[in-house]
Structures are given as structure tokens and as C-alpha cells.
Amino acid sequence: MMACSSPAAIVVEKEEEDETQLIDQRGAAVEDMPETPPKRRKMGNKYGAFESKEQEQLKKCEKLESKARKVLNMAYEKLFTALSRGQMPDGIKYLKERMDTLKKKTSLDPICIGFLGRTGAGKSSLLNAMIGKRLFLPVSGNRACTSCIVQVKRSKNDYCEATIHLLSEEEWKDELKNLVEVLRKTGDDYEDDNSDESVSEAIDKLCTLYGAGAENKSYEELLQTKMTVTIPARRVIQLKEKEAEGFSKALDPYIRVGDGDCKALCPWPLIKNVEVTIPGSDILPEGITFVDIPGTGDFNSKRDEMWEKSIETCSVLWIISDIERVLGEKVQGSLLDAGIKAYIGGICMDMAMVVTKSDKLNLEEYKRERGNKDVPIKNKRDAILERNEDVKRKKEKSMKEKLKRRLLPDSELLLKPHLVYTVSATEFWEAAHLSPEETEIPELRKNIRRIYLNEKKKLVTDYVNEVLGLLLLAENFGSEEHLLEQHFQESGVEEFMNKEIDTLGRNLERCFSEIEQPLCDGVKHARTNYKKIVDRMLTRDDGYKGFHRTLKAVCLKNGVYASKVFARIDFNENLARPLYEKIEGTFGGIFRIQRITRTSLWAQLENFKAAVQEKIRQIGRDNKLPNDHTKIKTCIHEIDVILMKLRQKILTKKTGIYQTLPIAIQDVLKPHYQEASRVSGFQSCQKMQGILRENIEKEVAKKMFEKAKSKMMSYFLELKGEIMATLEKETSVVLKLILLQHEQLAVRLPDIENECREIKRLHSMLQTID
């Protein structure tokens, strides 16, 4: 039996503050050191994960970003030291707040790569291969994994560390109440052998935390029962080890559910999520976070919320399935649906299916099953590669058929050359039959590098753009050119901007109204088909033994039951599916960023930007001002920055809008779910089914689907209002700053001409990075 933990691995809570302080001191010292200090070389080459050309691009990006930060800091010190003792005008306060925010901005938001798959699908083995550490994360083996989410990222420390977050006391009480309710005996239990998954999971959790016989106790009794495990006061457990092997052993019981002593010592039912950091590596780029997203969610509300949130925040999603189940597993369809939802309604920019354990093949059996084909199979390598190609062809065909039904025909995902990868972590390490390239691990790494590099270049460009805009604004405060202020005021540029914002509002209304007819069609579709959907939800192909337990669990969680074995059960999502079938193409078209059409949201914003910037240029031309006049360039540049920042706000709102439909349905049905969950006694299953059927029918008659449609349209209207309010506020402030005259300031602002010149140079250099 593997030890649960080593004493050295657990950091005592009272020591945590000292350790954090030590790390901070190290970080501060490192910043003052030369670029490649000898003591840090063992940490690995910062750019080692990339090929030489990619390394050069990254180095250029980071060098330019570093210089831009220094320029910003120097300008900040010059500008605001002089003003810190006096009363700042509103315009200067605005500028200072913008600079404060920009100074704190990270160089690269984490790029999350999500591994979405059921327990035992090979996620941990694949993740270990991706980071180049074979036995780093414990693999499932014959023991089941916990349902917690595990994040792995690179750090600047020279040790491995894990932070294990536990459910709060209130979060656990909420789950405890539901677990006890699932186990409550009813008249239908006479033939129940506790084989239902919801029951066995509830018993396992209670006995782990409260000891044998806990499943027979009431909720009140369990609250008075002392737990058999020790819970830290802060409900956080920290592990730290110098060597990866020792760290893996310490982490093992928190990642996997074991038996005996190991199981008793570790509070796995309380684990919410685990954050793992590893020392710098030549394999894992800094800024990449791998996220192991288990199963199809969790019975605990908080963990299930984190499951959904993790999918929403992933830039890349890999649907993981092992080779022996890939062609017939139902869970896969549920996971693929979750991935498509994230692609349409979230920030996900890429998705693929990754088929693991491709080396698992019995050569003689495979030869017999394939029959007498034209090309004979000589060895296991040929058999593996042939089967891989066959699996790819079949899965890509079925995936594309599903994607075509839900995405626009020219969607970037549909145009990808590869949607399916067949990998073998075992062969990657052992190379018994396949070369490293044939395991396709290197190809997956290449894809991650490409995404990372593109995102890094984009973020650095955006950062330098914003610094340039701020310094141009600041430079204007010291300008004594009053002629342009008069031109601006006489040109009516502010009135023009307000008019264009009003025009944008009307265009946004037309843009968002594109979804109304598909939503109306969706409502009709849902009203026509909801009874069939309800029948599918409330019937079971493999018999009804124990089904009352599962149905109770679904009702306790307001229509959602996340199972580790079965596909995710979500009544609200099922009822909303007919609406989604009608709107997904239109929804994707409204928010698409690449290959935008003239009716898309981004096209309307670009039209607004072009009109306003052309007006500003026209003012310059009318008054025979040079093309590079400072105030003209400043105004044009700030409009770019305003739209760039607005884009991120829109992407955040997009996710909430897309999820409106099942949430609205859940809100309507919540009282009926709760009523059904309280049913007990003989024939409780039939009673719960009756309550749900009857009340869903009533709510449909009371326009449940129409309410969901109206809710989504109201969120579109809200988004339109936020876009217009943001533009009105930001453009008004920019104009006031540009027209702010030198005499209006209480003190003379320092000269930042050199800083402006340098940031312009850096901005030009960025354009040369390809």
C-alpha cells in the first residue's frame, strides 16, 4: 500500500506565512539578478519548450514588453510624483487609474488546456507525457480518481507544490443533507441492493468521513459525529517536495480514492480542487495551465459549479477517451456536447478528441477481426497504426456531422485538418513499437506552442498599444498647441461621436434581432417535442431498479445529476436543447471574431471605429495638419484601445447570454424539483415521475419556453446598453483629455517626450515579429 503522505510533505499552517515570505524574497532577489543567473540554470531553459524560431519570437516579444513596462514606470514616476501633493483634475485622475491598472497587468493570462474525460480514460498519463514527467501525477490504475479538478502549471520555484482546497463547512453541510436524503429508505427499497451508483457513492463518502455505519445515521446525528479525518482550520492542505517522486507519493491519496488506511487518512470527499505547480521545465511553457476535468461534473454543487467554470475558462478542450471505448461510449457524446457549448458560448478557440492507450492491442485478435485485407499486417506497429487511422476516420466523420449541425459551415473548427489524435503515453516513454512522433504527443505539444505563441504576441501587442495610447494622452497635457482645440470644438467631433454611438445602438439592435426569429422557431420546436424529451428523461432502458434513487438525486440538485459513471443528467439542458438547435448557428455568427460577416457584432463595432477615426482624420485634413500630428494620432489610437478593451467585456457577457436558456428553465421548474425530492413511501419513483410530468406540462402551457426566450433577449438588450454606455463614457473622457489645455493644470507637467518616442519605437518593432 502506498503511503498517504510523508511528514515532510505537509506544510504546517503556522509555517505557511514564513514560507510565502521566503518565496517573495527570492522573487524580489531574482529580479535584480542577471538574466540567466547560474543558480537558476538547473531550472531549465525558459524557452526550452519551443523550437529555435519560436524562441526568437518569444524573446523579442518579452524583451519589447519588458522595455514597455520600464518606459511606463518612468513616465508614471515623472507624471505623478509632481501631482501627488496637489488636487488632481478629473482627467489626470482618469489617466493615473489607467496607468495603475496597466502597471499591475500580467504579461500573459493563463492559457488553460482542459482534459475532459471520465475516470480511467488516461488523462493523467497523457498529462504526464505532455509535461515530460512520467510518474508525476498518479494514474488511476485500479483505483478510482476523485471528482476534483486538478490544475498543473509551471512555477519559478525549484520544488513541486500542491494546494488542496477543501469544501467549506457550509458547502459540506449542503452536500451532507443531500447525501442523507439519497439514502433515505422508501417503500421502493424492498428489492434495492444498494447497487445504484448514487447510493454507493453516498455510502462511500459518509463512511470515509464518519466511520462504519454512517449511512444509517440521520443528518442531525452526523452533524454531532466527529469526523475520522483531521480537517485543517483554514480548510487548505499544502504539500511540498523537492523531488518529483516523493511529491507524487504524497499527492496520490488526494488524487485517487484508495482503501484502508490511506482512504481513512485523506478527506477525499471534501476535496474541492487541487492546484499543482512544478519547477521550470523545457517542456511546459510558462503561462500554460493544464486542467484535468474529471467525468461529467459532481453531485456537490460547488464542485459541479467549478466543473462548469473550468470548461468555460479553457482556451483549448481535449475530449479524452481510451481506444477500447472510443467507438461506443455514451459519456463521450455528453463530453463533446460540453465542449461544443464552450466553443460556441465561451472563450474556447480550439477543440479536439484525443484517443488514449492506442498501444493496447492484441495482435492475433486484431488480425482475426480485420479479416483478409489486401495489405497484410506484419507486426504490432503496423496493426496499431492501421487501427489508429481507422479510429480517426470514423471519429472525425461522426464529430464533423455533429459539428456541422451546430456550427456555421465555415467555422474554424470545421476547417481544421485534424480533429482526432490517437496517442500512447506508454509508447512515448518506452518506444517498444512506435516512434515518439507516431505516439502523436509531439504533435499535441506543437499545437499548444502555436496557440501560446499567437496569444503571447497578441497580448504583448495589446499591452504596448495601450501604453502608447496613455503616453500620447499624457504628452498632450504638456502641449501648448491651442489651435487644434479650436478645430475640434468647431468641427463638432463630440456631437459626431454621440451620433455614431446612437447609430451603433440601432445597428446592434438589428444585429441582435437576428436571433429572435430562430428563438421563436426554437420555442415552437420545444413545445412540439418536450413530451418526447420528458419521456426519455424519465424512462430507463436497463430497468428501473434503483432508479428512484437517481431520480431523487436529480431533483435534489434542481434537475442536474453529475455521475462519475453515466453521462451527465441535466433535465434543464435537455428541455432547452430544441431552442439551441435553432439558434446556435445564428448565435455563433453574431459573436464570431474570425471571418466576421457584415451583420456580426464585431462588424458593427469596426464600422463605428472606422467612422469616428475618419472624422478625426478629416479634421486634420481640413485644417492642413500633418498626418502625424500628435493629437490626431492620440485620438485615433485611443479609439482603438477603447474597442480592444470592450472586446474582452463582450466575451465575458457572451458566456452568460448563451447559458440563459437552461438557467431560465431551471428557475421555473425549481419548486417542482423540490416537491418531487420530498416524495417518500411506496411507489415513490412513479410519484416523482408524475409530479415532474404534470408540472412540466403546466409550465409549458404557462409559457416556460417563451420566458426563457425573453430572458435571453433581455440579456442581449442589456449587452447593447453596456456597449453604448462604455463607449459614451470612454470617448467623452478621451475628448476631454485631448482638449485639456496646459493652463488648466495647477502645475506644469514634466516632459515625457523621450518616453513617447521610445514607446513609438517599440510599437514599430512589434510589427516586425512574424
Image (cartoon, grey):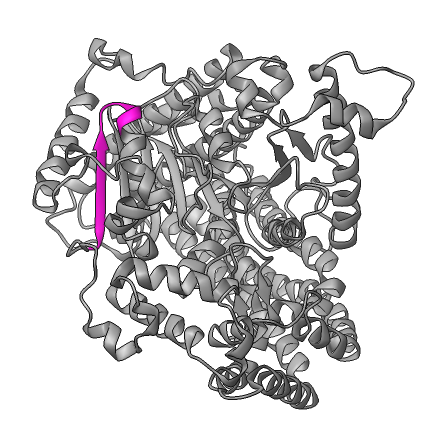
Q: Is residue 349 above or below residue 453?
A: below
Q: Is residue 385 above or below residue 357?
A: above
* Left or right for 676, reference 480: right
Determine if the magenta segment contains residue 195.
no
Q: Which residues are magenta?
A: 235-246
The x and y percentages for residue 752 are 28, 31
Q: Nearer the viewer, residue 19 or 62?
A: 19
The quarter in which the N terminus is drawn is top left
Query: Residue 70's image quarter?
Result: top left
The quarter in which the C terminus is drawn is top right
Look at the image and tell me whether residue 477 can be seen: no
The x and y percentages for residue 283 are 44, 20
Q: Nearer the viewer, residue 663 or 490?
A: 663
Determine if the magenta segment contains residue 240.
yes
The x and y percentages for residue 502 are 59, 66
* Left or right for 329, reference 199: right
> In the rendered picture of this protein, how many numbered marks are placed on residues?
0
Q: Nearer the viewer, residue 126 or 377?
A: 377
Q: Is residue 481 above or below residue 379?
A: below
Which residue is located at x 24 percent, y 26 percent?
159
* Left or right for 230, reference 425: left
Look at the image and tell me whether residue 659 can be seen: yes
Query: Residue 3's image quarter?
Result: top left
